[in-house]
Amino acid sequence: MLLKSGLTRGTRSLTSERGDVPGWVLITLMTAGLVIIIWGLAGPALSSVFQQAIDRVTGF
């Protein structure tokens, strides 16, 4: 009897922590959108900084 109640409790806890799939999809899409926006805004500046660093290193 103890084993059966333990299995039921364990199974119930696994199914209750499954999560909200549409919520995770929304979070993933929003994160991807933010990365694209930030990359679009900061990309040219980061490229410029990288190019300056390479120029300084190769200039010696």
Image (spheres, rainbow, N blue to C red):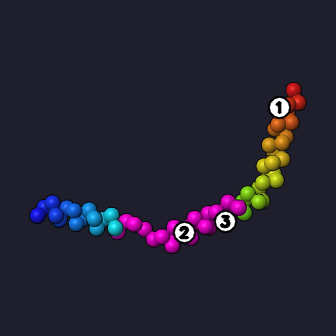
Instruction: Tell me the distance, in whole angstroms, between the alpha carbons under discs 3 and 1.
Output: 35 Å
Amino acid beneath label 2: Val
Give the extent of the magenta segment. Answer: 16-36
Q: Residues within 10 Å of mark 2 (few under 14, many from 20)?
A: few
Q: Main secondary structure of the magenta part?
A: helix
Residue highlighted by disc 2: 25
- Where on the picture, by quarter, is residue 20? bottom left
Give the quarter of the image for residue 34.
bottom right
In front of the other: label 2 or label 1? 2
Mark 3: few, some, or many residues within 10 Å (few <14, many ≥20)? few
Residue at 67% from the left image edge and 60% from the top image edge: 35
Q: Where residue 26 appears, x then y in whole percent?
A: 56, 70
Residue 31's x, y, as percent? Answer: 61, 63
User: Could you classify mark 1 by the number of other residues whose Cα lies within 10 Å: few (under 14), some (14-19), or many (20 or more)?
Assistant: few
* Outermost right residue: 59
Q: Position of residue 3 (x, y in %)?
A: 15, 60
In the rendered structure, which disc, 2 or 1, sits on the residue that comes first in sequence? Answer: 2
- Contact, mark 3 vs mark 1 (Cβ under 8 Å): no
Q: Which mark is residue 33?
A: 3
| Residue 57: image tag | 1
